Image: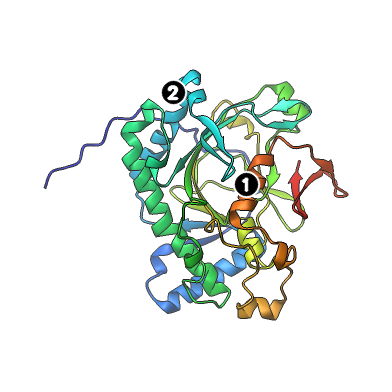
Amino acid sequence: MPVTTLPPVPHYNAAPPTKADLDYADLATIDLSKMESAQCRAALASQVRDALLTHGFFYVVNHGYSQAQTDRIFDIADVPFSCVSDEEKRLYADIDQETGWYRAYKLRQYWHIDAGVRDHIEFINIDRDVHKQGHPEALRPFLPEVEEFARFNHTNVLLAVLRLIALSLELPEDALVKLHNCNDLVEAFVKFIKYHPRSAEDEEKTNNVWFKGHTDSGSVTILWSQPVAALQILGKDSKWRWVKHVENALIVNAGDAIDFLTGGYYMGTIHRVVQPPPDQQQYTRLGALYVAMTDGDVKLVPLYESPVLKRVGINPCCENSVALTMLEWRRRRANGYGRTELRPSKDKGVEEEIIDGVVVKHYN
C-alpha cells in the first residue's frame, strides 16, 4: 500500500511551558475513549454537567489525534502568518456581512482594546468546506489537511460533546446534534490565531489585557492546548484564573448559543487573554481552534422539553417572539466587537453593549 507523502512545512518553535507559579483553574477532564457504552456516556454527561455549571471549561483527552498530528497542525497553523506577506494577507481580509464573520484574515490593529491601544492579534478563519473561500498561496498545499482537521474536530469531538450536553439535560442524545448540520447560513470553521508581543507602554495602558473578557458567540469552541500561558477564565468568585497547558489535550467551552438554548442554566464562559508570564513574554502565542455554531436558522430559545430545565427553572434572555436566530446573533456580535462604543457597567471593570435588548458584557 503506497505511503502518502505530506508536503513539507516549516516548523513552528513553540515556547517551553512556563515555570511561573500561577493560580490555575481546576478543570475537569473528559476522556472520550469512554464513550463506548450508554452507561459510560451517562457518567461522562454527569461530569460535563458539573464542569459547565462550575467553570464552563473542561479538558478533552483521548480524542484520537496523536501528538505528532497535533504538532503538524500547529506547524500548518503558523503558515498563514509567517509565510504570507502583509500585502497578500490584505487580499484575503474581508468580512461577510451576511454571516458576520471574517472571510480568511483579521489583520493586526483592527480592534480597539483600551486607552487608544489597538490589538496585536491576527487570525485566519477557514470554512470547514475549504472550497468556499480563497486562500493565500502558501497555505494551499495544506488545505486537504486543514479540511481533515475540521472534519475530525466536528465528527470526533464536537458531536461527542453535543451528545454529552444533551444527555446532561436528559434529552435524546442527538437533540443538539440535529441543530448542528452546518447549513449554508452559518458554518463551523477552523481558526488559526497568532498573538504578538506588545510594548511595555501598551501593556501598562491596557492592564496587560490582550483580549477583553467575553463569551463566545457560538455554541461550542474547541481550543487545542498550547504552552503559552495567557488564557484566563472568570470564576464565580469573580477571580481570574489561568488555564493550564495539558499536552495534546483540547480545551472546550460553551458559548452564547448554549446559554440561550438552556435558558441560562449553562452560561457562556467568560474568558480573556492577557500578557503571558515573564518567562514567555518574548514568544508569540499560536492557537488552533474549531468554532461551532448551530445552524443559522435555529432560533435561540430554551429547550423547554428538557426535564432538567423544567426542574431548575428556565430564565430566557428575552421573549421567544423576539429571540434571534444563530445567524442574526453571530452577525451582530461579530460586527460589533472592537468597533462599537462600550458603555460603563455598574460592575467594576465591566463595559456593556446592548444587542437587540440582550446585555453583552466585556470584562477588562
Q: Residues within 10 Å of mark 2 (few under 14, many from 20)?
A: some
Distance Cα–Cα, label 1 vs label 2: 28 Å
Q: Residues within 10 Å of mark 1 (few under 14, many from 20)?
A: some
Check whether the beta carbons of the residues at disc 1 and disc 2 lie within 8 A of each other. Answer: no
Quarter occupied by the C terminus: top right
- Which residue appears at 76% of the width and 27% of the height? 204
Is 49 above or below relative to 233?
below
Instruction: Give the residue displayed 39% in from the left and 59% down from the top.
Output: 156
Residue 44 position within the rendered picture, expressed as x and y whole percent measured from the top left: 50, 70
Q: Secondary structure at mark 2?
A: loop
Left or right: residue 134 versus residue 59 is: left
Q: Is residue 99 above or below residue 339?
A: below
Tell whether 47 sits left or right of 338.
Answer: left
Check disc 2 and give the amino acid type: Val
**Residue pictured at 76% horizontal, 25% vertical:** 116
Image disc number at residue 331: 1
Rendered image coloring scheme: rainbow
Closer to the camera in the image, 13 or 92 = 92
> Depth check: 257 or 235 in front?
257
Give the image quarter of residue 297: bottom right
Residue 1 spot, x, y in % from top left: 11, 48
Q: Which of 103 and 177 lies nearest the eye of the viewer?
A: 103
Task: Kindly state the secondary structure of the residue where label 1 is placed.
Answer: helix
Residue furthest right as drawn? 346
Residue that mark 2 sits on? 84
